[in-house]
Image: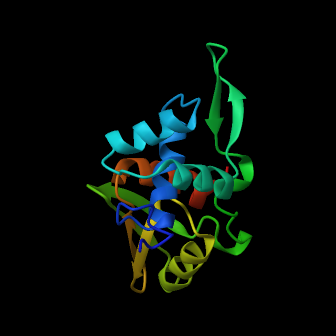
Amino acid sequence: GRDRTDGGDGMNRRERQGVILRLVREQELATQAELAAALHEAGHDVVQTTVSRDIRELGLVKVRAAGGRLVYAAPEHARPRELAPSFRRTALTIESSANIVLVTTQSGFASALAEELDRANHPLVLGTIAGDNTIMILAREGVSGTELRDELRAYLLEGAA
């Protein structure tokens, strides 16, 4: 049988839901069929029941788009939880290349900040590797390093938006 978390395409639930959050930010998707089609175009074939379950688990809501259509959007609570205040502004630089973001921190802060990022469960982050003052952050499939860098700059330098 199929693993209930992979939707039949081999992609795990967390990864797929990260792609869904990106798609609803970038496109006006009004129906489950439109969302499934967008996932298909992104290279992920899933059954409609999986799309329905993901919508429910992510808590997607319908909002009125500029053209008047009701489209899916991520609710505020679907954003990653805010970093502890002690971790804000510990990042000194945040740069990207391909699907990788490199964060430099004050000496000794990288490991603790990487641990906090992992716990925050950010939907665009696949994982982190940390040294003394540097963190390498891998973006999820379908997320560019530039997109993740911009998101992390707001997240790390100002706290969750």
Residue at 37% from the left image edge and 48% from the top image edge: 146
Give the quarter of the image for residue 159: bottom right
Q: Position of residue 17 (x, y in %)?
A: 52, 57
Q: Give the side of residue 67 with respect to residue 95, left or right.
A: right
Does the rendering let one see residue 159? no
In the image, farthest residue toward the left? 98
Above or below — where is 112 with respect to 103? below
Does the rendering let one see residue 155? yes
Total marks in image: 0
Pick whichever, 61 or 122, lies toward us.
61
In the image, farthest residue toward the top? 67
In the image, farthest residue toward the front? 1
Image quadrant in which the N terminus is located: bottom left
Pick whichever, 158 or 41, lies toward us.
41
Q: Position of residue 134 (x, y in %)?
A: 39, 76
Q: How is the image coloured?
A: rainbow
Give the quarter of the image for residue 118: bottom right
Q: Position of residue 121 (x, y in %)?
A: 58, 69
Residue at 35% from the left image edge and 60% from the top image edge: 9
Residue at 64% from the left image edge and 19% from the top image edge: 69
Pick whichever, 161 or 143, lies toward us.
143
Q: Position of residue 109 (x, y in %)?
A: 53, 81
Q: Give the side of residue 159 with respect to residue 123, left or right.
A: right
Residue at 51% from the left image edge and 47% from the top image edge: 48
